[in-house]
Image (cartoon, rainbow, N blue to C red):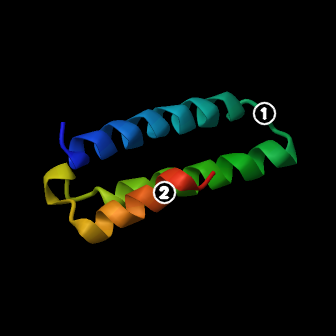
Amino acid sequence: MDKIDELKDRVEARKHELLAKYNELKADTAHEAIEQRTKLKKKLDDLERYIKTGWDNVDAAVRSKLDKWLEHD
């Protein structure tokens, strides 16, 4: 497994965690839940923007962004 495959696996796992959390919060109308959903949505949108051209086109700059994306909560 090369570095891109490892990164892709880590990103996909984190994406699924965030989607599960987002879906969990959908039913909650509390102000804190709405804020948390907004943050999760932004994080997921950032991910989509980073990989919009596909994993085959991920360069060093995008890899760096994805590594940082994985670090932040």
Where does the image place residue 14, in percent across and percent down from the top left?
Answer: 48, 38
Label 2 SS: helix
Q: Residues within 10 Å of mark 2 (few under 14, many from 20)?
A: some
Q: Relative to 38, say whether 5 is above or below.
A: above
Residue at (21, 60) in percent of width and height: 58
Where does the image place residue 47, in percent across and percent down from the top left?
Answer: 41, 54
Q: Which of marks 1 and 2 is in front?
A: 2
Residues at marks 1 and 2, CA–CA distance in whole angstroms: 25 Å
Left or right, 62 with reference to 33: left
Residue at (73, 30) in percent of width and height: 27
- Which residue type does callout 1 highlight? Asp
Residue at (83, 47) in percent of width and height: 32
Q: Relative to 32, say whether 20 is above or below.
A: above
Quadrant of the image for the N terminus? top left
> 58 or 48, which lies in front?
58
Task: Identify the residue under disc 2.
Answer: 69
Where does the image place residue 22, in percent across and percent down from the top left?
Answer: 61, 37
> 62 or 30, which lies in front?
62
Left or right, 38 with reference to 67: right
Count of labels in the image: 2
Tell whether label 2 touches label 1 (CB within 8 Å). Answer: no
Task: Identify the residue under disc 1.
Answer: 28
Q: Residues within 10 Å of mark 1 (few under 14, many from 20)?
A: few
- Which residue type does callout 2 highlight? Trp
Left or right, 4 with reference to 11: left
Q: Which of marks 1 and 2 is nearer the N terminus?
A: 1
Residue at (37, 65) in percent of width and height: 64
